Image (tube, rainbow, N blue to C red):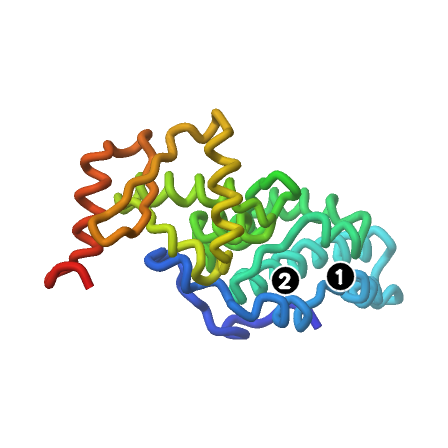
Amino acid sequence: MFRRRKPGFAVEINKKEFGNESNEINADRAEEELRMKIDLVDLLDEEDLVDAESQDMEEQGEQVGGSKYILLADFIRERSIGSMLTSQKSLVEEDETVEETIEKMGGEEDTQDIVSIKGNEDVYYYSNQYMSDNYAMIAMLVEEKDLSKTIVEMVRWNCKTYPCPTPIYYFGKTPYSYNDEEIEIALNKLREDERYKDIKELLTGNNIRYFYSTLHMSEKYARALAESTEQGEYGYN
């Protein structure tokens, strides 16, 4: 199922242009995860069936070992094309020796696009040919379901990158899809955490709540940007 594909085996989605990250993660995540359920045990078992009569044991071992890291890399690439990270825990559950393959993959020139991002719960792998680092960060936050941290990280990132403050309704959209109660609970938690004291809130003239980070912009600047967004060309809607 996850054998190495030839070039062109799937549509190459260019996620390097990281414009609207909230619209790029597949809303049908659960269905896609089921369709692409990891089955590395079967995959690796199949690769062990090398023609032993045509080579000695040392050559056979080298061929099998070499193929494993390539297959794993292609598997991670395919999931990255499908907007999904690959967690280390899920790989270990399928093959207890996969960490050796991961280590080998990290040292080979033809798999240098396979990188990782560390969350609070796990380490996640992806191909930076098909998924940007910022996109991977969002996918990791969504995967770990830590809304307080998600709000903080995205508010800081938006302020630093665009720059712009973040409206509260941002977290009700895909891929976050949190309801009002969940958002309020998360906001109350982050207000009590000293690590997040840079996150501030303001209210626009049409009563839309925006959040910004004092690490990257002043209240005056954040308010000007928020008001400009809400008023647009023709004033408040």
Question: In the shown orientation, is residue 132 left or right of residue 51?
Answer: left
- Residue contact between numbered discs 1 and 2, judged by CB atoms under 8 Å: yes
The residue that label 1 is drawn on is 40
Distance of label 1 from label 2 (alpha carbons): 9 Å
What SS does tag 1 mark?
helix
What residue is shown at x 21% (from left), y 41% (from top)?
223
What SS does tag 2 mark?
helix
- Asked if one can make out residue 117 in the rendered structure from this viewpoint, the answer is yes
The residue that label 2 is drawn on is 75
Marker count (numbered):
2
* Mark nearer the N terminus (1 vs 2): 1
Question: On screen, 41 above or below 102?
Answer: below
Question: How far across and down, in percent of the image, does residue 83 sit?
Answer: 52, 62
Q: Identify residue type, mark 2.
A: Phe
What residue is shown at x 63% (from left), y 44% (from top)?
123
Which dot marks residue 19?
none
Question: How far across and down, in percent of the image, does residue 138 sit?
Answer: 48, 50
Q: Identify residue type, mark 1.
A: Leu
Question: How far across and down, in percent of the image, does residue 96 sit?
Answer: 81, 49
Question: How far across and down, in percent of the image, does residue 230 sit?
Answer: 21, 55
Question: On screen, 93 above or below 159?
Answer: below
Question: On screen, 177 above or below 154?
Answer: below
Q: Quadrant of the N terminus?
A: bottom right
